[in-house]
Amino acid sequence: MIDDETILGVIETLAARHGATSRIAMFGGTAVLLGGNMVAALSPRGLLLRVGGDRHDAALARPGTRPMEVRGNSMRGYLYVDPAGLDSASLHEWAQMAVDHVAGLPAKAARRERGPRRMVED
């Protein structure tokens, strides 16, 4: 099995060919961003990849994948890949698929720092 830092490093290296990358805490793990857009996130739930709606069905048909679900709804264009089933070649293939999709998206404007969030009581 490939370790977490190697997985994130491969994704970040491929993404960096297209622009500025960063890592942030997201979805209970670490995400790699390209131009402010998430390429992938690695957490205990698996490797979340943003493959795009046009590649979604074909990617989801591959072994070791499952849809990303939020409140019971499948999020088209996003899917999980089981990191335990990745070897170097398949990691590069998945990472390239996500990078290719995100590289075609417009970069997001930098977010300004916000203060602490306040909880609203009912």
Image (cartoon, grey):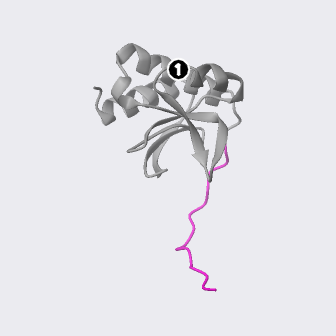
The residue lying at 56 percent from left, 31 percent from top is 19
The C terminus is located in which quarter? bottom right
Tell me: residue 60, above or below residue 93.
Answer: below
Please identify the quarter of the rendering in which residue 61 is found.
top right
Farthest residue, direction bottom: 122
- Front-most of 22 and 118? 118
Secondary element type, mark 1: helix
Horizontal side of residue 42 vs 77, given as left or right: left
Horizontal side of residue 16 vs 74, given as left or right: left
Residue 45 lies, in percent from the top left, at: 42, 43
The residue lying at 56 percent from left, 63 percent from top is 113
Horizontal side of residue 22 vs 73, given as left or right: left
- Write down the region rendered in magenta: 108-122
Residue 12 lies, in percent from the top left, at: 45, 31
Farthest residue, direction top: 89
Tell me: residue 119, above or below residue 82.
Answer: below
The residue lying at 40 percent from left, 13 percent from top is 89
Let me know if residue 68 is in the magenta part.
no
Q: Which residue is mark 1?
A: 96
Question: How many labels, in total?
Answer: 1
- Front-most of 16 and 87? 87
- Front-most of 70 and 27? 70
Q: Main secondary structure of the magenta part?
A: loop
Horizontal side of residue 59 vs 81, given as left or right: right
Few, some or many residues within 10 Å of mark 1 (<14, 14–19, 20+): some
Which amino acid, by three-letter code, is at mark 1?
Gln
The residue lying at 62 percent from left, 31 percent from top is 102
Residue 63 lies, in percent from the top left, at: 48, 21
The N terminus is located in which quarter? top left
- Front-most of 120 and 62? 62
